[in-house]
Amino acid sequence: MLGSLTTVMATGNRTVTGVVYDQSTNYPLAGVNVNVEGTGISEKTNQNGAYTINVPEKNITLIFSHVGFENKKVIFKNKGVVNVYLKPSVFCEDLVVMSYGSPKADKSASLAEVQVAAPQQTLQGRAAGIQVSPGKPGASQRIMIRGKATVNGIYGRYAPPQEQESYKGITENGFQSAMDIPLSTFSIDVDAASYSNVRRFINSGQLPPKDAVRIEEMINYFNYNLPAPTNNEPVAIHTELSAAPWNPQHRLLRIGLKARVVATDKLPASNLVFLIDVSGSMNQSNKLPLVQSSLKMLVDQLRPQDKVAIVVYAGAAGLVLPSTPGNQKTTIKDAIDRLSAGGSTAGGEGIKLAYKTAVQNFIKNGNNRVILATDGDFNVGASSDGDMETLIEQERKSGVFLSVLGYGMGNYKDSKMETLADKGNGNYAYIDNITEARKTLVSEFGGTLFTVAKDVKLQLEFNPAKVASYRLIGYENRLLNKEDFNNDQKDAGDMGAGHTVTALYEIIPAGVHDKFTHSVDPLKYQKAEKPATNFISNDMLTIKFRYKEPAGSVSKLSQAVVMDKPVEFKNTSVDFRFATAVAEFGMLLRDSEFKQGSKYNEAIEMARAAKGNDHEGYRAEFVKLAESAKLLSKSGLVAVEE
């Protein structure tokens, strides 16, 4: 039974439920007094900040009070759910340590064990001598207070721990010699999670951790105007070549891929499984409530031939809605609305059940997909990045794809979710607000959910007569060995209907001196080959491109040749210039050793002049974001990463 995972209304004249949060951190508050004004009716919030209280039929006023916070009155009329945010009553968010039951004293050390009515925190100042054991935000903590026989009313300060967020380390791609290493091979990446996550940091007043900045995902957050493929091909390839604005002696190559556009009514039937994390860490306003709103927007896009099942997981996993036709929207939305959060996080078990459910309802030649919504904080069963990678590689053999939607902050596990989407033949988005949810699940519905080409790989061969060295900007987590390009068993990225993908290479032309490449001593046992300077062609490089049909197992090959004919930067397309501005901005955020002459002002002005037909306003938003980052770069406010 999964009764603990759904909201159950108590009996009585009227029942009010809700969650009380700390306004300054969005963390739920335990131990808050909820009183009905003028009566003796009262309740307290539980360890997840949730409360349920029976009230009279007439209009009443609820009073929410908690030590260290300002009281708040809410006039209650008809609503059955009242969520409240309490404002700290003192500067720097004073923490109040509350005792639950009788604390046990350790006579030998004069210690008291109590529960703390707040998420994990770092205690300082007046709370010296208090030690907090590790735990998840939103869960009760055990603390030790030295020399105290009573614990009520002990005050301290706390700060939400950014260090609990985890990001996979990135070692930036360096310049490679075209003579020594003529081949560059990588898997495409349509994910865009890094950009919205970076935006969240900057909008909160701090620069993101360097490893949160994946430049290719920032570039690919935006749509680009590329010609669609012809002759019923799933993907078309386009190139542009100009000078790099941060070093005009260098070339900048843009490779653009455009996937086939498929009208919504022509898309194949979908067999979807919503896999929803309802553990205690999701009990925040920007997590489970936002997940519910997001998925209901997706439900509105479904057709009668589509179907949806819902699997949830906390301490255990369970099926809360069997596969249901897409035209039964009320049934699906009611199941989503009934979800509430609490407990630990058995993500591995949830993934297994979701794939099992998808396989049981498999649609041949259809879109079979698990959509995982989580903050990535798995802590029961298979939980490490390696465990997750092995699990997903096994489950994807079923032909079911995986999309990952990330939510929340503070304990956000970006590294785990990127791994899941990468290995699950799917995509990864970070949802920081309802507008981003609409972009991902409504505006880009086809690209998010319907794959038209899988295992998409590129391999570039550089002509050493034209190229001294080259560098792929971003895609550090997507590099492949040169042998992987022709190996159809090697997994790679996937493209959805209408998707565009952009990759940028910085190229140092032959004969241009640079500080990034260095020579080695002559080999003793092999003769060094001389550069093919007498090569007749004006080719600068050749691009080879492999992909498979969604249900295929054998790849198809295409190729394109790029001639050494750069155009002036001012004459390039607005998309080329805008993508370049985003790349320059990303290098500045990472404080890249390859940023060279990059400047915030240059990136801002470049983007402002290349907004083009910005119907949704995303490019204008980028300009404002870059302006904010410029100001923050002067203050040194950078988020701490684990």
Image (cartoon, rainbow, N blue to C red):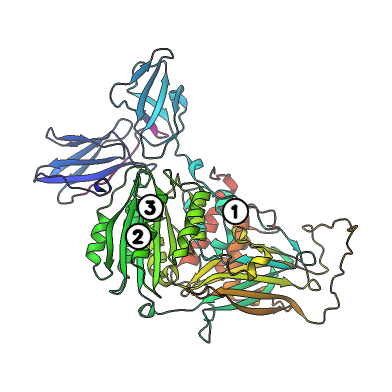
Q: Badge 3: few (under 14), some or many (20 or more) residues near its Cα, within 10 Å?
A: many
Q: Answer above or below: position of 603 versus 92.
A: below
Q: Which residue is mark 1?
A: 589
Sequence-wise, which precedes: disc 3 or disc 2?
2
Amino acid at dot 1: Leu
* Cα gap from disc 3 to disc 2, whole angstroms: 10 Å
Amino acid at dot 3: Gly
Q: Nearer the viewer, residue 68 or 257?
A: 257
Q: Given this view, does label 3 or label 1 mark the residue nearer the observer?
A: 3
Task: Indicate the position of residue 471 as horizontal and vertical percent values.
Answer: 70, 63
Q: Which residue is mark 2?
A: 274
| In the image, residue 534 lies in the stretch drawn in magenta | no
- Residue positioned 79% across, 61% down in the render: 514
* Cα gap from disc 3 to disc 1, whole angstroms: 36 Å
| In the image, residue 93 lies in the stretch drawn in magenta | yes
Q: Residue furthest bottom?
A: 231
Label 1: which secondary element = helix
Task: Indicate the position of residue 429 as horizontal and vertical percent values.
Answer: 46, 60
Sequence-wise, which precedes: disc 2 or disc 1?
2
Circles 2, 1 touching at the beta carbon (< 8 Å): no
Residue interval drawn in magenta: 81-95
Q: Badge 2: few (under 14), some or many (20 or more) residues near its Cα, within 10 Å?
A: many
* Cα gap from disc 2 to disc 1, whole angstroms: 34 Å
Q: Is residue 428 left or right of residue 26?
A: right
Q: Residue furthest top?
A: 108
Q: Given this view, does label 3 or label 2 mark the residue nearer the observer?
A: 3
Task: Indicate the position of residue 216 as horizontal and vertical percent values.
Answer: 58, 62
Q: Answer above or below: position of 471 versus 638.
A: below
Q: Which mark is residue 350?
A: 3
Label 2: which secondary element = strand
Task: Indicate the position of residue 512 as horizontal and vertical percent values.
Answer: 81, 66
